Structure formats: structure tokens, C-alpha cells
């Protein structure tokens, strides 16, 4: 019999070495559970067909939204960016997050930049 174990989010975050490079650590139906470390600014983008959930583990995350609105998240808080809504995550200090996204969600949505990470690269060691 195989021993069952929970996923240690802190341990998974310690495996993340590159900012803005999500790492898949679990799957629930058609959703990936990812961890990431953020620092600086990503890019304005949207996901036309998927919502995206940001849960802050440590640090303070700002998510810029249209019309000069923004959401500020601190540890233990989450926000769901609705599908089709342009947004830009900003971390003035290092932020550790958990993302919950549909398995088809492209890293930078409708925009491709040098730092865009394919879903295949995000999966890595996930089994």
C-alpha cells in the first residue's frame, strides 16, 4: 500500500527558482494548481476563455485592472480575474502565490513575450 501525502505548498515554492515561471503542483479535474514567485511587473494580458485565480501565500500583490482599478492582495487573500478581463500583476517585493487555472490557460494569455512560459514547461516534474 502506498502512503498518501498532502502537497506542501511551502516546499513546492522553495523549488521555484525563476520569477514569473509557474510550476504545476496538482490537478483538479480540468484545473491546474500552480505555484509561482513574482517580482516586478508581468504584462497587460487577458485570457479570453478562462478565469484565473491568484492566492497570495506571502508578500503583497497588486493586480491592475481596466479603468485604473486595481486589487491589492496580502497573504491568505485571493482574487479571481474573470475571463476576458485585461490585467497586469505587479509585485514590488517578492510574492509567492498559488494559481488555479484551466489546463488550457496560456501563461500570458493573448500576449506573447520573451518571458512567456508554455504549459508544457510549467508541468515539469508533475505526475
Image: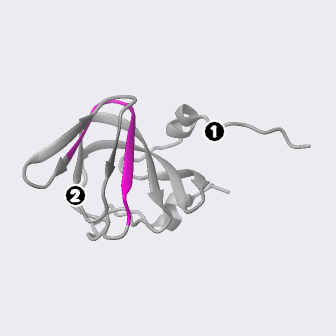
Picture disc at residue 25? none
From the image, tell me which residue sits under label 1.
7
Q: Name the residue: 50% across, 64% down.
A: 103
Residue 75 position by quadrant: top left
What is the residue that sits farthest to the left in this orientation? 67
**Label 1 neighbourhood size at 10 Å, few (<14), some (14-19), many (20+)?**
few
Looking at the rendering, in which quadrant would you find the N terminus? top right
Magenta stretch prevailing secondary structure: strand
> Is 109 drawn above or below residue 24 in the view shown?
below
Number of numbered labels in the structure image? 2
Residue found at the far right of this picture: 1
Residue 39: percent from left, percent from top: 29, 41
Q: Give me the C-alpha separation between circle 1 and circle 2.
A: 30 Å
Q: Write down the residue under mark 2.
A: 43
Asked if disc 1 and disc 2 are in contact, CB closer than 8 Å, the reply is: no
Mark 1 vs mark 2, foreground winner is: 1
Magenta region, residue range:
50-63
46 over 96 or under it: above or below:
below
Q: Residue at x 21, y 60 (%)?
A: 86
Where, quadrant-wise, is the C terminus in this rendering?
bottom right
Query: Is 59 positioned to the left or the right of 5 in the image?
Result: left
**Displayed quadrant of residue 17:** top left
Query: Can residue 87 be found in the magenta stretch?
Result: no
| Relative side of 41 to 49, left or right | left
Q: Earlier in the sequence, mark 1 or mark 2?
A: 1
Is residue 92 shown to the viewer in this render? no
| SS under mark 1 | loop
Scheme by which the image is coloured: one colour
Give the percent coordinates (x, y) of residue 109: 32, 66
Q: Examine the rendering and report whether any part of residue 40 can be seen.
A: yes
Amino acid at each position: 500500500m502506498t502512503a498518501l501525502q498532502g502537497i506542501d505548498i511551502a516546499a513546492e515554492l522553495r523549488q521555484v527558482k525563476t520569477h514569473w515561471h509557474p510550476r504545476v503542483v496538482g490537478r483538479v479535474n480540468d484545473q491546474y494548481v500552480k505555484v509561482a514567485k513574482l517580482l516586478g511587473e508581468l504584462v497587460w494580458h487577458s485570457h479570453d476563455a478562462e478565469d484565473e485565480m491568484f492566492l497570495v501565500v506571502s508578500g503583497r500583490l497588486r493586480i491592475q485592472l481596466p479603468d485604473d482599478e486595481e486589487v491589492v492582495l496580502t497573504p491568505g487573500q485571493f482574487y479571481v480575474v474573470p475571463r476576458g478581463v485585461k490585467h497586469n500583476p505587479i509585485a514590488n517585493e517578492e510574492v509567492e502565490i498559488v494559481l488555479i487555472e484551466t489546463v488550457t490557460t496560456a501563461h500570458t494569455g493573448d500576449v506573447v513575450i520573451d518571458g512567456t512560459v508554455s504549459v508544457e514547461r510549467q508541468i515539469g516534474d508533475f505526475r
